[in-house]
Image (cartoon, rainbow, N blue to C red):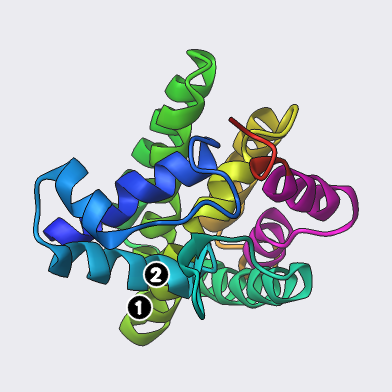
Amino acid sequence: MSQAQRLRQTIEDEIVAGHLAVGARLDEVMLAERFGVSRTPIREALLQLAVTGLVETKPRKGTIVSAPEPQHLLAMFETMAELEAACGRFAARRLTPDHEAALKAALAACEASAAAGDTEGYYAENQVFHAVVYGACRNAFLAEQARLLSRRLAPYRRLQLRTRHRLGQSLAEHAGIVAAILAGDDAAAAERLRTHVVVQGDRFSDLVAGLRSLGDAA
């Protein structure tokens, strides 16, 4: 991971945790002094954050913490759901013994974090779980597209896990996905991944409410 990527992750964490509120100005000079780096990696980190919609640059205001438009966020999740459904379909058809072992291990790690009530740990293991599914599809181009969009949606998927009961629901969905892939049921694997990723109804409302609450956080 590059210096800019590490900085992006740190700033992203502070935004999602509410330590940097919506509307807060992100000054490159102050951030460079705070982290003890030059302005170049700070500038790169802010550009990466702008891609996710967590920051934006405004005339005479500079770079500020923001939140994406709900409809744009919904479109991104819908696209992610279809990419992951395709990954699941191919994984069920093309599963190798090595990928099967990796999938079981990833699920076990998610179960351990959930049992410990470790939301942040679960988030990290959740990323590993989905990455394993991408690899198991054995379609390098599809896997790369899924990884790219997954990185853009990472802060919002993390925020979504904080909603009540979502962690337990996510784990149950993971178990269902693994069962379908191991059974070679490509249709079920695709549908379960699509349902797991897409946000609709109450889940989307909760996600948008969580984003709005960042603006009120201290």
Q: Image quarter for residue 162?
A: top right
The numbered dot on residue 147 is 2
Callout 1 amino acid: Glu
Callout 2 amino acid: Arg
Name the side, left or right, on which 215 lies relative to 21: right
* SS for dot 2: helix
Name the side, left or right, on which 216 lies relative to 26: right
Question: Can residue 103 be seen by looking at this rendering?
Answer: no
Does the magenta portion include 29?
no
Pointer 1 and pointer 2: residues touching (CB < 8 Å)? yes
Q: Image quarter for residue 85?
A: bottom right
For marks 1 and 2, give the CA distance: 5 Å
Report the magenta residues as a range.
Answer: 189-212
Residue at image x 32%, y 62%?
96
- Examine the rendered structure and indicate whether residue 106 appears above or below residue 26: above
Does the magenta portion include 191?
yes
Q: Position of residue 91 (x, y in %)?
A: 46, 67
Out of 134 and 65, give the one closest to the viewer. Answer: 65
Question: Can residue 142 be seen by looking at this rendering?
Answer: yes
Q: Position of residue 203 (x, y in %)?
A: 81, 48
Out of 41 and 125, give the one closest to the viewer. Answer: 41
Name the side, left or right, on which 99 lies relative to 201: left
Residue at label 1? 144
Out of 32 and 187, give the one closest to the viewer. Answer: 32
Residue at image x 54%, y 57%?
181
* SS for dot 1: helix
- Examine the rendered structure and indicate whether residue 126 appears above or below residue 136: above
Name the side, left or right, on which 186 lies relative to 8: right
